[in-house]
Image (cartoon, rainbow, N blue to C red):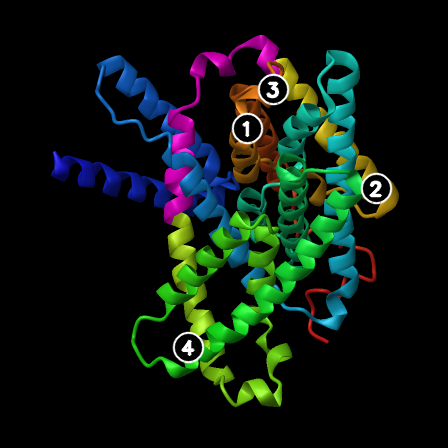
Amino acid sequence: MTDYIILILCIIVIISYAFDISAKYSKIPGIIFLILLGIGIQFIVKTLNLEIPNFQPLLPVMGTLGLIMIVMDASLDLKLEKRKKSLVIKSITSALVLFAVFTAALAYILIEVFNIPVRDALMNSIPMGVISSSVAIPSAINLKTNEKEFVVYESSFSDIFGILLFDFILISQGPIGQRIFNIAFNSIITLIISLITAVILGILLHKISYHVNYVIIMTSVVLVYILAKIFHLPALLLVVTFGLALSNSRFLEFKAVKRYVDFPKFRSDVEAFKKILAELTFLVKSFFFILFGYYTKIEGIFNWHNVITAAAITAGIFLFRMIFLKQVLRINLVPLLFFSPRGLITILLFLTIPAASRIPLITEEVVTLVILFTIFILILGNFIYKKEKLPAVIPSDLKTAGEPV
């Protein structure tokens, strides 16, 4: 039996690898194929009446690990440079405004039309407002450098804002003023912890001559993330800050620090770590989405009530995005309009909603359909986009973001 399990796992990894490679040429994100593969496995298991252990409890664990790895991988690619200031401001503004407006609009509809309590309405709306960095970032591979960086910053900070607000509503107690103060204070503490952790890690890498280094880096990231969650700190903000500290270590090269850290070696280790991280991210993400597809209720996907609800939510997502990009940021809509997929964070946050706060209108099948619809629109955008024929999509102050100075 053990041999068959290992054989199946190997076949799944190879198939996922084929999906990942094909995505570069077909412009179809591999997540679509992974979810469909999971649904296909479910259909085969039911048809053949096979006995399969319950792996559903693994979904939150694998999703959390995948989230840490994806955001860490993205933050390691971000170089803080003065010439990127305008791009970073615009992308972060886009992430914050679009997330806030859509979440508020959906929550308002749930409250006024369906008489859902405010807290429950917000908790069910937030997952729908978060752009998935796990889908958007890999799908932006064929974009111009400045467009790709816009997607990376926007999706990463959309994840951060979504998780911060969700945690704020889920666990915070007391008056609203006290809650806001707590989250601001916790964010500052998180930033300090991230920088200190980066320095400590650099010192350890400098002192340790043992050949196993990259496991220590990854374990440190996961450890600090989990500790941050236990103490109700914005854990994802910690991962992003930690990744930025690693990829921009030149800002930490003070005399007092250089005495203990060999920065050339440190940067070399970080570059090698990025390669290992990409491999681990691929594995975790593949199994997560296959499991998610496997536990999706097929009959619910074809329910017209769910389809209409998901279609309305998707329409709202891209309507707000179109208005904001065109009227506020004043940039051409292609291709950035299409890069607003939902995915890993949406699933994780939805699974975290307490059972008592779930509402009948937004079910797991609706979430799945919203993910599929937004990814199909992203695919459409990739097919429409012809970077060699289109003018620059970013205003003049962003055009130099990906060009040498």
Alpha-carbon span between mark 4 and mark 2:
47 Å
Q: Which mark is residue 205?
A: 4
> What's under tag 3, amino acid-wise?
Ile
- 176 relative position to 353: left or right: right
| Looking at the image, residue 160 lies above or below residue 383 | below
Q: Which residue is mark 2?
A: 326
State whether the magenta stretch is mostly helix, strand or loop: helix
The residue segment tinted magenta is 283-307
Q: Which residue is mark 1?
A: 372
Alpha-carbon span between mark 1 and mark 4:
42 Å
Dot 1: element? helix
Q: Which residue is mark 3?
A: 362
Residue at the location (42% across, 61% down)? 218
Question: In terms of sequence position, does the residue under pointer 2 or pointer 3 come before the other?
Answer: 2
Alpha-carbon span between mark 2 and mark 3:
30 Å
Dot 4: element? helix
In magenta segment, residue 301: yes
Residue 123 picture location, percent across and down: 65, 29
| Looking at the image, residue 200 lies above or below residue 137 | below
Residue at the outermost top position? 304
Question: In terms of sequence position, does the residue under pointer 1 or pointer 4 come before the other?
Answer: 4
Question: In terms of sequence position, does the residue under pointer 4 or pointer 2 come before the other?
Answer: 4
> What's under tag 1, amino acid-wise?
Leu
Which tag is nearer the camera, tag 2 or tag 3?
3
- Tell which of 178 and 278 is nearer to you: 178
Q: Classify mark 4: residues with Cα within 10 Å, few (<14), some (14-19) or many (20+).
A: many
